[in-house]
Image: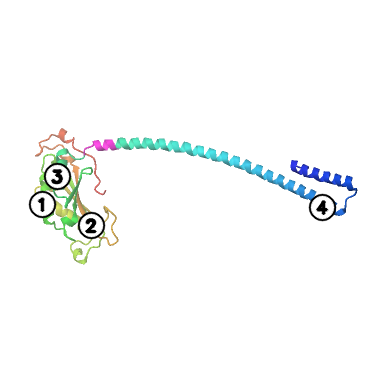
């Protein structure tokens, strides 16, 4: 079968042949061979065009299928994206609601919170106050000499002011969790005689803070001491391990449930004391 172009080429060839015969009678063998070659070339080209057309039609069909598949996949992805957007928006609303609830929980009572803020403002080089966590952080480099658990004079003055805060009526409801931390710098041979490891040093520094507070009139049974050593860095330790930000002593204020029903110097009833903040604080954070 010939396409339109193939038929035209064949018709032209036949017409030329007819004219040649009509004008000159028999054609030469050479002329005939040339005409046959032209015919075959036209037929071969026609077949080639037919194959290209079929290939093009197949490619277009495949492209159409691929486009359909792509459109289907895109539709599914868009639907999934919309679902995730909705879930994300719902989670965002939930997080906002939880955040508002947490902010509504007053961890520290106003009077103690105000007193601790003033203390930190008066001694910013020695202590920091985190009201959201109910925590005072003493910077070890300004609280202790290197490798020592002996309190420096400036730290003793700050702790004396803290003891006055802790004797207040509102502050009496809190237990104190004193937690020591070090960086990852290795203990020197001289220090190791008194503090074999960083953990020992961190605990011994917590004990020194407790000893100072009890000497100032804070009951020992209100105070817990602990030490993490280098295990809970505030920031990544440097290659040498010498990282001042990680050398610290933190004091966490925790509501004392056992004191809720007592009527000591606070003069508050058990019912009143249950209004104290009870949100748990993780000293490891």
Spatial separation of the CA atoms under disc 2 and disc 3: 24 Å
Sooner in the amino-acid sequence: mark 4 or mark 2: 4
Bin the neighbour count of mark 1 within 10 Å (Cα to Cα): few under 14, some 14-19, many 20 and up: few
Specify the farthest residue to the front: 23
Q: Along the horizontal axis of the image, is 87 left or right of 50?
A: left
Spatial separation of the CA atoms under disc 4 and disc 3: 112 Å
Q: Which residue is mark 3?
A: 118
In the rendered image, residue 49, in percent from the top left (x then y), is placed at 71, 46
Q: Main secondary structure of the magenta part?
A: helix
Look at the numbered disc 1 and give the secondary structure of its residue.
helix
Q: Which mark is residue 110?
A: none
In the rendered image, residue 87, in percent from the top left (x then y), is placed at 40, 36
* Magenta span contains residue 36: no
Residues in magenta, as a range: 99-106
Look at the numbered disc 3 and give the secondary structure of its residue.
helix
Task: Please report contact status of discs 4 and 2: CB closer than 8 Å, yes or no.
Answer: no
Spatial separation of the CA atoms under disc 2 and disc 1: 22 Å
Q: Which residue is mark 2?
A: 244
Q: Which residue is mark 4?
A: 34
Foreground: 75 or 42?
42
Kindly identify the residue that appears in the image at 83 percent across and 46 percent down: 16
Foreground: 163 or 123?
123
Q: Nearer the viewer, mark 1 or mark 3?
A: 3
């Amino acid at each position: 079968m010939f396409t339109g172009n193939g038929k035209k080429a064949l018709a032209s060839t036949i017409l030329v042949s007819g004219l040649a015969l009509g004008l000159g009678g028999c054609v030469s063998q050479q002329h005939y061979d040339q005409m046959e070659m032209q015919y075959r070339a036209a037929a071969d080209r026609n077949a080639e065009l037919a194959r290209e057309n079929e290939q093009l039609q197949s490619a277009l069909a495949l492209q159409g299928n691929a486009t359909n598949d792509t459109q289907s996949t895109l539709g599914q992805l868009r639907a999934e994206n919309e679902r995730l957007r909705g879930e994300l928006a719902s989670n965002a609303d939930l997080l906002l609601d939880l955040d508002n609830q947490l902010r509504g929980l007053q961890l520290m009572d106003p009077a103690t919170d105000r007193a601790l803020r003033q203390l930190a403002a008066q001694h910013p080089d020695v202590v920091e106050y985190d009201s959201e966590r109910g925590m005072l952080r003493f910077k070890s480099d300004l609280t202790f000499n290197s490798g020592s658990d002996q309190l420096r004079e400036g730290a003793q003055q700050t702790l004396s002011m803290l003891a006055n805060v802790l004797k207040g009526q509102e502050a009496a409801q809190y237990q104190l969790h004193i937690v020591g931390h070090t960086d990852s710098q290795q203990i020197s041979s001289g220090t190791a005689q008194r503090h074999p490891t960083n953990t020992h040093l961190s605990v011994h520094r917590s004990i020194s803070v407790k000893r100072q507070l009890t000497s100032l009139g804070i009951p020992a049974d209100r105070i817990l001491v602990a030490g993490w050593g280098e295990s809970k860095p505030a920031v990544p330790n440097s290659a040498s391990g010498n990282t001042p930000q990680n050398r610290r002593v933190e004091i966490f204020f925790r509501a004392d449930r056992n004191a809720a029903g007592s009527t000591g110097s606070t003069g508050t009833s058990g019912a009143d004391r249950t209004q104290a903040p009870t949100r748990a604080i993780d000293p490891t954070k």
